[in-house]
Image: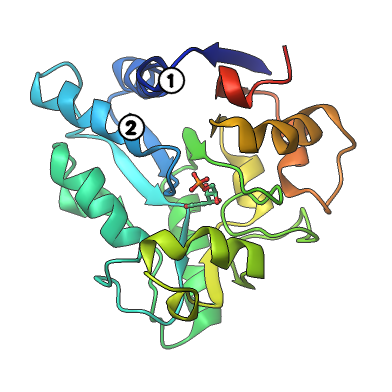
Amino acid sequence: MKIIVKDGQQDFDHAAAMEIVQLINKKPNAVIGLATGHTPKGMYKVLGEMCKNNEVDFSNVITFNLDEYLGIKSDHPGSCKSYLQERFYDLVNLKQQNIYHLNSQPEDYEEECHRYNRLIQQIGGIDLLILGIGHNGHLGFNEPNTSFKTEVHVCQLTDRTRTANIWSFGCKEDVPTEGITMGIKNIMGCKKLMLLANGEAKADIVKRALKGVVTEELPASVLQLHNDVVIILDKEANELV
Ligand code: F6R
């Protein structure tokens, strides 16, 4: 596990962006998994700027979004798709046909899970998955006590997660109660993982996840079992080194 600690938002965002740029330089058709949330916003912005300046080329890159809310339209302003559309897809030269998304309104939930699992497998797996961490240690929408054996699945969002995401819906009542997410097995199947965390409020959970006991009660602790993980923190989130 490689741990990088940066001082300040700009350096943090840049370090995260550079992991992606380096991968694409080595493998122009890399498959990248995308998280949403507050933490990677700056990284996406840096990637947009670098793409505009021809410093990185996404034209052969393939992306899979990590998770999505259920029961809202895909173009709802709070959806993960809208977030990525506005903050990433619109800023880079990804090809539309290379962008894969979980459907927020599938007719058949189970079939949607199978479809996404199949797609990930058919494409040959994910080279790099970007992850944030919830205050309760969730990864994607894998809340505490999710089995490490899960693949793409439908999940109930905890009260804490819904509260943390009011910012993208306006009020708690509007935050969906269910999501669909890559499971821990999908996450662990990715060739490389990059976990981003910033701010003092994340320091304790990051430490417990990465230095504590590996347990399904704290989903992010599973990262200790992956052989290629880079953790990018800012000074405030770092109690590790
Ligand atoms: C979002 C996601 C979540 C977030 C996590 C941290 O796609 O998968 O697991 O990464 O909730 O969110 P922020 O960055 O808002 O603290």
Q: Name the N-terminal-most of marks 2 and 1.
A: 1
Q: Nearer the viewer, residue 230 or 158?
A: 158
| Residue shown at the point (53%, 70%) measured from the top left | 179
Examine the image and state in which quarter residue 230 appears: top right
Asked if the beta carbon under badge 1 is closer than 8 A to the nearest atom of ligand 1, the reply is no
Q: Nearer the viewer, residue 194 or 135?
A: 135
Q: CA distance from mark 2 to mark 1?
A: 8 Å
Q: Is residue 55 visible?
A: yes
As shown in the figure, which amino acid type bears the numbered disc 1? Phe
Location of the C terminus by quadrant is top right
> Relative to residue 86, is residue 238 drawn left or right?
right
Residue pointed to by mark 2: 42
| Residue shown at the point (53%, 40%) measured from the top left | 131
What is the secondary structure assignment of the residue under circle 1? helix
What is the secondary structure assignment of the residue under circle 2? helix
Q: Give the x, y percent position of residue 95.
A: 16, 45
